[in-house]
Image (cartoon, helix red, strand yellow):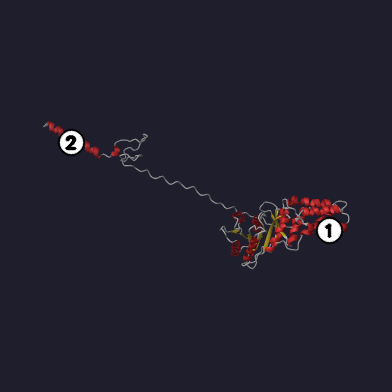
Amino acid sequence: MEYIILIVVLAVLILTIGGTLLLRPRGTRGIRRGRAGGDLGTGTGTETSDSGTGTGTATVPPPAPPAERPAEPEVTKPALEKPPPSAGRMVRLRARLARSQSGFGSALLSLLSRDRLDDDTWDEIEEVLITADVGVTPARQMVSDLRTRVKVEGTRTPDEVRAMLRAELLEQVETEASRALRTQRHEGRPAVMLMVGVNGTGKTTTCGKLARALIGDGETVVLGAERVGRAAAADQLQTWGERVGAEVVRSDKEGADPASVAFEAVSRGIESEADVVLVDTAGRLHTKTGLMDELGKVKRVIEKRTSVDEVLLVLDATTGQNGLRQARVFAEVVDVSGIVLTKLDGTAKGGIVIAVQRELGVPVKLVGLGEGPDDLAPFDAATFVDAILGG
């Protein structure tokens, strides 16, 4: 009987212990180690396994937060600049002009100051004038006029020689045509200016500099980038416009009609009540008839909305007589109203001013006297001649 009671007690104990073990949560059996011996759990009722083969309930780690996308760099537009007014620019740039042109004037002064002016001396004077790009016909005219003055005035002091030469140069450089740019609004519409010329003359740069000068004078400007075939030129004009607050109308569409871009620029200028619309035309080669005809079309299309007030022909002053050939062809296609001579501060000869005015019968209105943004100046004959003579 005692044995039976002992067996029953042992059985109850075994059942009690076994039931307790079966009911106990598995995660509390102790601390499990991962493959590298690291702690994976400490009796919290769950068990993590990096291999997915553990017998516990795997806890999936929360997803990592998405990586922050780098902030896109802000596109900063150039700060608006306040250009100085154009008045007096050529006077301020006179010293620069004198450095590049004084060789021409000093040679003439030296020859005319000789005690005896024989035929050989007059031939040298004519040669100096021709070398300075004055042109053969104007050079001969100047020599004839100077010889007459010398005979009439007789003896010549250095001051008298300078005054005589200055008067002759002024007579050749001056013109009855006005050098003023027509930039005033009329009939409720903006003034329209076309910038024409061949590639490489600095036309787009001149267009940007002129817009800058006009804004410095208090005008509002719309720029038309008609050069649809050259995105770089349109980008350059866009930069000029952004710097001074001029709106730019352009088209980067393949095959866009240049005339339609010019028409849109003029329309935008009318809508915004701008003072001036300045259109930079493509740098057409003067030997390509089709391209020159296209320039004529641009002008005709613009005139369906309003008149064209200025057609400025941009010439590289360093090209000399070749520039005159270009000028002739452009003048046949559009009515050129004024000349812009660029690079006059470089290796250009000052006589080109006389030659181009005589050739076209239109005045030089603007000259480029450097690479700076404010180095485009209204042409002034007296300042130009004084710079040539170094006075």
Q: Which residue lies at the image location 71% right of the left edge and 54% below the top edge?
A: 319
* Quadrant of the drawing holding the N terminus: top left
Q: Residue at x 23, y 38 (%)?
A: 20
Residue 36 rendering spot, x and y as whole percentages: 37, 34
* Residue under label 1: 144
Residue furthest out toward the top? 3
Q: Is 23 drawn above or below residue 284 in the view shown?
A: above
- Left/right of residue 53 with respect to residue 343 in the rendered view: left
Q: Which residue is mark 2?
A: 12
Res 391 seen here: no
Q: Quadrant of residue 228?
A: bottom right
Q: Amino acid at mark 2?
A: Val
Mark 2 vs mark 1, CA separation in Å: 146 Å
The disc labelled 1 sits on which kind of residue? Answer: Ser
Q: Picture quarter containing residue 19?
A: top left
Comparing 24 with 161, the one in front is: 161
Q: Secondary structure at mark 2?
A: helix
Q: Position of residue 225 (x, y in %)?
A: 61, 58
